[in-house]
Image (cartoon, rainbow, N blue to C red):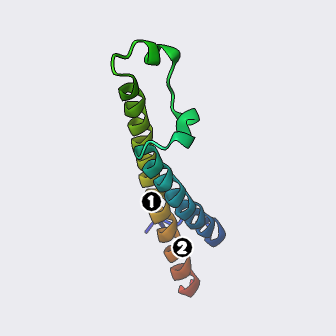
Amino acid sequence: MPSLLFCGPKLAACGIVLSVWGVIMLSMLGIFFSAKSAVLIEDVPFTEEDIRNDKDPPQIIYGLYNQVGINCFIAAAIYVGVGAVSLCQVRLNKRQEYMVT
């Protein structure tokens, strides 16, 4: 039977730590972008034409804020998946410690 174990215990633990950090960081960024934080305006991808051609000026910028916030939440969900895989690897490594070959 093939083993699903593909990384060692240290790499799996590192993956869990990075995943937890990524989920916390990106979730907070997603919340702040969704709240349209003025501090994050430099990270919103808009051009001067977006401002000039807009009949209702803040609406395009607000839409871009929301899009970046959604992207942050998607990236946080990917980190949750990576964390789940890392957790499975930790458990498989612990199981392998107790197996006698």
Q: Which numbered disc flags the more N-terminal residue, 2 or 1? A: 1
State yes or no: discs 2 and 1 in contact (Cβ < 8 Å).
no
Q: Is residue 63 left or right of residue 20?
A: left
Q: Is residue 100 visible?
A: no
Label placed on residue 1: none
Q: Where is residue 49 in the image (x, y as percent from the top left)?
A: 47, 13
Q: Height in image: 81 above or below 97?
A: above
Tell me the residue at 49%/58% (across/down): 23
Read off the residue under disc 2. 90
Mark 2 is on which residue type? Val
Q: Height in image: 83 above or below 61?
A: below
Tell me the residue at 59%/66% (across/down): 17
Of the pair 40 and 82, the residue shown nearer to us: 40
Tell me the residue at 51%/60% (across/down): 24
Mark 1 is on which residue type? Val
Please name which of the two marks, 2 or 1, marks the residue nearer to the observer.
Answer: 1
Of the pair 90 and 34, the residue shown nearer to us: 34
* Tag 2 secondary structure: helix
Label placed on residue 80: 1
* Tag 1 secondary structure: helix
